[in-house]
Image (spheres, rainbow, N blue to C red):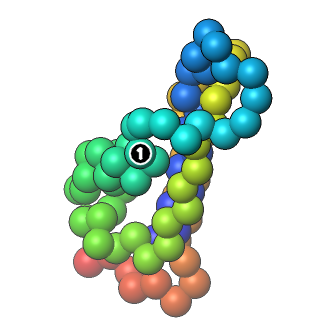
Amino acid sequence: MRVQLRFMLPAPKTWRSGLPTTRPDVENLAKGLLDSWNGVLYRDDSQVAELMLSKAYSIANPGVWVTVERMNGAAKEP
């Protein structure tokens, strides 16, 4: 499986520009989502062979953009 997660964090009131370099860590945000999808999107998150993560600030639409794809040559689910 290939998973892409883009975390759009609420922008702080003092933010002017640039990428967020503060907590929460992007890998900690991803771990919670990947674990919660066990048995739902895949049998286990160990099936994720490619993981792309990013975080940015969003003034209008905070949330998470998610893309999940089966990779060519991936084993079929039992």
Estimate the x, y position of residue 9 in percent, counting from the top left. Answer: 55, 28
Estimate the x, y position of residue 61 in percent, counting from the top left. Answer: 65, 21
Estimate the x, y position of residue 58 in percent, counting from the top left. Answer: 66, 25
Residue sticking out furthest to the bottom: 73
In this view, 28 is above or below 11 = below
In this view, 40 is above or below 17 = below
Q: Residue type at mark 1?
A: Asp
Q: Which residue is mark 1?
A: 25
- Disc 1 on helix, strand or loop? loop
Please give left or right for residue 34 compared with residue 21 in the image: left
Q: Residue at x 76, y 29 (%)?
A: 17
Estimate the x, y position of residue 4 in percent, counting from the top left. Answer: 56, 57
Q: Residue at x 29, y 45 (%)?
A: 32
Nearest to the observer: residue 26 or residue 35: 26
Nearest to the observer: residue 57 or residue 37: 57
In this view, 27 is above or below 19 = below
